[in-house]
Structure formats: structure tokens, C-alpha cells
Amino acid sequence: MDLTRALTRVAPRAPSSEQLVDRVPYARDLWPRHHLEVRAGDSTAKTAPRAVVWPRTTEEVAAIVKLCASEGVPIVPYGAGSGVCAGVLPGPEALVIDLKRMDSWRALDQRAPLLDVEAGALGITLEERLQRKGFTVGHFPSSILCSTVGGWLAARGAGQCSGKYGKIEDMVAELELVDGRGEVVTLKRRAGGLDLVPLVIGSEGTLGVITSAKLRLHPNPSARVFVAYSFPGVEAGWTAMRQMFQAGLRPAVSRLYDPFDSFLANQGGVRAKKRTGAHRPGSGTKALSKILRAPRLLNGLIEGIGDRVLGDANLVLIFEGHGDEPFADAARADAIARTLGATSLGDGPAKKWHQHRYSVSYRQAPVFMGGAFSDTMEVAAPWSRLGELYRSVRKALGRHVFVMAHLSHAYPDGCSIYFTFAGAAGSDADGLALYDRAWRAAMEASLAAGGTLSHHHGVGRSKAPRVPSELGEAGVSMLRATMRAFDPARVMNPGALLPSDTSAATSRPPMPPEGFSLDELSEVATLPGAATLAECAAWLGERGFSIGAELDLSLTVDAWIAAGLPGARDPWSDPVDHTLVGLRADTPRGALALAPSPRRAVGPDLFALFVGGGGRAGHARAADVRVSRRGASPARALPFDWPRAPAVSADEARLFDAIVST
């Protein structure tokens, strides 16, 4: 088949190309391993797609997908290519659909407030335009200069202000998708009923092409408070973060840097100062490359000198809102920090971070040019597992590469840890092997410690081999059923999310017992599926905790989940706090076990098949639920005037039927 001629026939106004000069830029995303391969002499032409097409409308996308489904042509949806997990790796048979020409605002509802925007809209342009109209999405990923709305949704991304506004999945009221059959479907988010939106968010192009989304907005903050603290150790710092979030505080930004990261920040960061005279470009990074060949020695040296030389762990906080609210919240945070031995650093470090908050995305190139490599790994765990996660992943990475860490994206039940690491070897071939060993060790360590594989970067092909370890056999089977329901011809981004061989699964993350248990540190209760909510409330009440005030106490936990968690806290009012955080269920595909996690970005959110699913996907044996201490202050409610429970459409019902009946 002459693909470009066929594309012109079905979508005559959508430009397309099979020219190599047009195809090569779409061969890969920003996965650091790609950079190593290119440096080793691997040509991007090997993974360049068969053709590229640039549609302007949803109708054109639908016609293109329908053509590819009928002809068996693989499809890779493409935003701005800033992903770091090999979500984009087309191959010579694939068609790349670049969506950046679909960047229109379809409607701005200033009352709700809400924006209906197409998937190709570039992040920074979208946010700057919104702010001129008095609104913000509240989503500020470090890639905002080079990422799109569709990419945010596909990867289940997180922005730097997630402490107040949540992750991208908390901002979507509705999305439009062209599924793998070429049919246009609209999925609506709903509380208290079936909600398939969480299946598409994080699906990385494997279910269809996201063409638009309705994003919840907020009024621009009129006041902002910058504060920073020095803590006597990183654990004291994250204890302060935990207590703040569990006390109902929602700093837009909360970032805790370990002593070495804090030391670098105090010295002005990793960027070299300008020098005069005969300085050879790249000489500094080449010297660094040699040092990085002894990572154990370097890590040991840093750990050995410890806090005596490096100093303390620094916490950066930014509160924003209206009137006196940010100032009052900052005062409450100050009281918590000081009880844990914190010393105020004033507003300077927080303002400095805010000023340079996007520059981290552009610091990799000199490292690779100098013969080394660098990468990041973002994982998450409940507060009770955070120490083990921090130590285990640091140790696993430290055997192979130099490693630093900071904590960001905190929630009442847990937090994300962002590891930055760098390494070098004598040759590019050895560097690739070293890179792979470091990643395998780190993923194993994260899962063994009770963490996730990903908090917000997604899976792509980078982490796909370990997805069966996190989701288990039943979870992988449910994910495959979801893919078949949305994409019967299996043309959507094949190879992403799941490995072709699932036998590589390793030991599962640790699971709580299935009877009544309480993780007081994380404020998460494990409740038996057969127990009534009345029994749960009584058990929790004896321990000073509450599950909620407006529940039908006659329901069992399993029936409560099947009905859509009626009476649970409103997810729009406090998007940072989720109710269901872990699940063990009996399904037709076997026993499903999803360890409790504050958030995960490991493909579609399988909770969506159970919450509001009427028990058709399976029945809960035990659920891990966020609970609150009696008398705890709730978070400030964020207003949003939008239906909480719209009717389920015929398309939504059809897709759900196809998933659970497969």
C-alpha cells in the first residue's frame, strides 16, 4: 500500500510525508538510553517511522486510524516528544500521528471554570494564555516548555504544583478519544459511578489517540508565600512534609533535598561558572566522566563526610491562594517545622528554585557530550515505606552510578522520591550495559521496598519488563483486556507498557494483611471486603480514626467500591487526597493485588474497573483506604461547579462491557 496516497484519500487536508528528513525527528523520544545508542553510532533512521501525518481535526484522526486498523499499520500518537521512557519508538512499519496542529481552544467556561482544549496544545503557551485571562490549570511539569496536553494525559504526568492542584488525572473532567477502531468516543469523569477516564490517562497511546480534554481550571493565585527550612536530617524533613499534608495543609510546592542535593543548591547548582582564558569546551564534563567510573567510591565519600560537611536537608515550600490564606497556612507549616528541629532559611531558596524551576530539563546534554550519562527515576510509596524505599533504591543504584535524591509530590498517605543519577564507562557499549544494570537494580529495589515503578514519567518500553512484577498476572491480563476492548486490531503503539514476554516478573511488592489493619503513619486502613462500613467505622473509631461522615454504613466494603464509593470525600474539592489507594480482589482472571501507593503511573488505573463497576470486574477481598484522625483539619476546598455524576453514555457502557466480558 502507498501509505501517503491512502492518507491523502481519507484525510485530504492533512499533510503527510514519507521523506527521511521528516521521519527521522520522530524516531525516538528523550529516553536517555536513546542518547547513549546514538552516541555509540546507532542511526535513528533504524527506528524512524514509515510516514508522518499532521491532522488538524478529530475527524481526520478518526479517518486515519480507521485506515490503519483495516490495513494493520501500527500507530504512534505524538505530542512534543519530551517523554523519557521510550514511549515513542515507532519502527519502519509505523505511522506517527503528530497532533501539534490540533491546539485550539474549543471553549472556555469561566463559570466552572473549565477549558475544552485540543491535545496538541503546548503547555507553556496554554498556561501563559490562560493566565492572561485570570486562570491557571495548575499543571507545571518541568517539561512544560516542550510538552503537550495529550502527552501529559498519556503519561499520567505530575506538575510542580501538585501539592495543591493534584496530578493531571485530577484535572480532567472529560476527554475525547479516537479508539483503535477509528471511532470517536467521549469519556466523562464521575464520582459515584463508572469512570473510564483513568483507564485512558496513563495509557501511553495504547488505547487510542487523545484528541481533546476538558481541564478543570483555578483562578490565578493573588498571593504567594515562599519559605524554606533546614532540617537536621532528611527523615526529619519528610516527617514535616507528612505532618503538614495530614494536617490539611496543601503547599503548592514542597520539595525536600537530601544533604548533597542541598549542598549543590547552596553552591549555585551543577552549572559551571563562566571562565576566561584557554578553557577547552567539555573538559569539565570529561573530567567528571572519569570520576563517575568509580561510583561506589564517590557515593561512599559523600556518605562518609555526611552532614558534618554537606550540611542539613533543605525543604522548599510555596503556598499560594487568595487573601490571607497562604500566609495563615505558611504560619501553620512553620509551627510544624520548628517542632522537628527546623531552622528557617527565609524566602531566598524558594524564590531561587521558582526562578529556575524549568532549567533542569536542559542539563543533560553536557553530561552526554562529556562521555557520561545521566537519568532520573521517580518512584513513590506510603509514608511508612518511604525510608525503606529511599535507602534501598539509593543502595541499589549506588553500586553502579553516582546518585542524588529529592522528595516532591507529597500526599497525606505518601510521597514521591526523585532519584537523579549519573554514570560512565570505558566505552559506549559498556555504558549501555552499565545503564541497564543500574535500572534493573533500581526497579527491583523499589518494588521490594513497597514502592511503585513510576509516579509520573510513565512506563514506555523502559520499565515495561517490570510491569508484571507490580501488576501481577491478573493485572496484566486486565490491562491486555482493556487494550483489546479499545483497540481490537492492536495497532495502537505496540510495544509500549507491556513486554512481549511476561515471564520476567519478579517478587511482588509487600502487601498488607487482608484483615483489619491500620498504617497510622500513612493514615491508611486495610478493610476486609466482606466487612460492613459500620463495622469498619467502629473498628477505626476505637483507634481514633474516621472513614467518612456520609456513608451508607449498611454496605460492605466490596459493595461500596462496586457502587462507586458513594459518600466518600469529593475528589474535586481536594484533588490531592484519594480514597482508594490499594486493592486485593478476586477476578475471573485470578487474584489481583495492587499494593497501596499514594499514586502510580504504571499504565491505566485498574481501580477504574472496580470503582463503580457493579462488581463485574471482580470483588474486593480487601481495600486500602485513606482515613483521617478524629478532629483533623480538612484541606481548604477548591470550588468547581461541574456535574459530579453525569449519565453513563452508550460508548462508555460498550467499552466497559468489552473489557469485563473478554
Image (cartoon, helix red, strand yellow):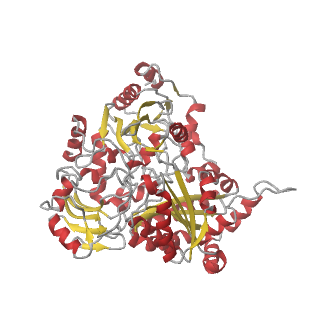
Q: Is residue 492 above or below residue 266?
A: above
Where, by quadrant of the figure, is residue 453 drawn? bottom left
**In this view, 10 is above or below 624:** above
On screen, residue 659 above or below 254? above
For the point 56% across and 43% down, the residue is: 146
* Number of callouts: 0
Q: Position of residue 257 (x, y in %)?
A: 56, 67
Quadrant containing the C terminus is: top left
Decide which of 391, 360 is in the foreground and name it. 360
Left or right of residue 553, residue 239 in this image: right
Camera-side residue: 530 or 268?
Answer: 268
Residue lying farthest to the left in this orientation: 554
From the top left corner, tell me how far across and down residue 221 is, in percent.
Answer: 50, 48
| Image spot of residue 553 (x, y percent) | 15, 62
Q: Quadrant of the N terminus?
A: top left
**In the picture provided, is 52 more to the left or to the right than 466?**
right
Q: Residue furthest front?
A: 324
| Left or right, residue 586 beside residue 450 | left
Residue at 44 percent of width and 55 percent of height: 164
Q: Could you say which quadrant of the image residue 6 lies in?
A: top left
Residue 449, x across and y down, in percent: 41, 71
Whether residue 145 is visible to the viewer of this picture, yes or no, is: yes
Compared to residue 523, the image places residue 208 above or below, namely above
